[in-house]
Amino acid sequence: MKGPFVRTGLALAVLAGLGAYIYFVESKKPSGSEKKKEKVLELSKDKVTALDIEPPSGEAVHLVKQGKDWKLGGPAAAPADANEVDSLLSTLQNLEVEEVVNEKPASLGEFGLDPPRRSLSATLAGAKQPLKLLLGDKTPDGGALYAKTPDKPRVFTIASYQEASLSKKPFDLRDRDLLHVKRDAVRTLEITGPDGSYALLRDDKGEWTFTRPLTTRAGRWAVDGLLGTLESLRMDSIAAEDAKDLKPFGLVKPARTLSLGLADGATKRLEIGSSAADKKYHAREASSSLVAVIPGAIVDDLAKGMKELRQKRLADIPTYEVTGVDATLEGKAFVYARSTTQAKQGVQEEKWKRTSPDKKDVDRSKVEDVLFKLSGVEVQDFVDKPQAAASYGLDQPFAKLSFRFEAGKPAVELTLGRKVGATYAKRPGDDAVLKLDSAKVDEALKALKEL
């Protein structure tokens, strides 16, 4: 009785072994053994000197390389967007034949290739003839696009998702950057508009300060966010290539202006005029006669006014940069210092110590928590035209704080006063008095004394 079962078991074992062997052998085959797809064009994008896109109707694209830059030719010659052009050329360079549909078709019309729906022609440096690609209809299932090259009669397909990349219009490839400015290059910023006029200055440490209408701290990240919006500002469309009359665009007396002073001494001035459409506006760079239509995000940011760019925290400092804290609380001095020691295996270890009123080691995490609480106290209100210091209890402050940093960076100093139950703060070199949340201040100072 055991014989048939034994033979069956042996057969199954052999089959399992054979399957495992085949899987092992197949898995060890190099991936290169798979047949590579054929490239549609033998093209190196670095050698392309001109590119033309001809649609059956509408605007044709003519791109010409001049040195390292690309230009759009035609009635409205303009600089091209280098990234967009590079993306298009990369698509052409990497384009692959998905399937050959017909080696010798009797009619090209059934594929939408007589005439083609679109043709692309790339001129290469040193080549006698340009490389051409003709595009037709989509396949019935929509997953591919019929195509051919003039040098062969065959019709093949390419992936349909490539169509969008190969169907660019002139404006798609145009350099739409309105200001051509990098945020890190901006040193001064002046803004005028219905929401107020103010000016800011960046120091050598990268910190921003309002210089008009008063001297007060600006929020570094808030200003950086605004500059980021300006850096990425792109035209949605063009209202006029060469405007002779600015009145129709509300730019004779712009509603808003932004003047950016750059590190190289140059100035960029953005003028924003009338509404062009829903949440879009006419705008131009003051030295240009081109009037563009821009998205409304920048106007939304500016409409928030100067307050949006102010430093809204008591001390906007990274806690990890602080090397020491000096505090005078109700006449009693507290001093804390951070030191770095060489621990085992060459690892550096940071420690905090209190040196006054007595000496003791302090838990690092607790110090960082206190620093976070102190620096993160939110400003409830800004008093930009303060009265005498006594009006805020600042003539007899109940607390003074100084945050020390590595050599080269000045300390951040704060004076805190109280009047009629309200808590106020003053920063050196700042014209404003800051009204604070009393409960949050008390919580932070209590934690500092308990270290």
Image (tube, rainbow, N blue to C red):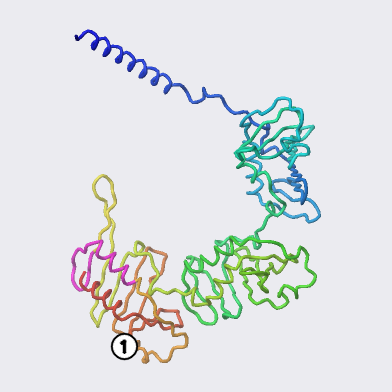
Amino acid of disc 1: Gln
Q: Quadrant of residue 180?
A: bottom right
Q: Viewer-proximal residue, 182 or 86?
A: 86
Residue 341 image position (x, y, % from top left): 26, 54
Residue 99 image position (x, y, % from top left): 62, 29
Q: Viewer-proximal residue, 121 or 77?
A: 121
Residue 224 image position (x, y, % from top left): 51, 65
Is residue 394 one of those drawn in magenta?
no
- Say whether residue 9 is left or right of residue 379: left
Label 1 element class: loop
Q: Residue at x 70, y 78 (%)?
A: 253
Which residue is identified by label 1?
396
Quadrant showing the N terminus:
top left
Q: Residue at x 58, y 68 (%)?
A: 298
Q: In which quarter of the image is residue 232?
A: bottom right
Position of residue 18 relative to residue 209, above or below, is above
Position of residue 169 relative to residue 100, above or below, is below
Magenta stretch, residue numbers: 353-374
Position of residue 5 relative to residue 411, above or below, is above
Residue 13 image position (x, y, % from top left): 29, 15
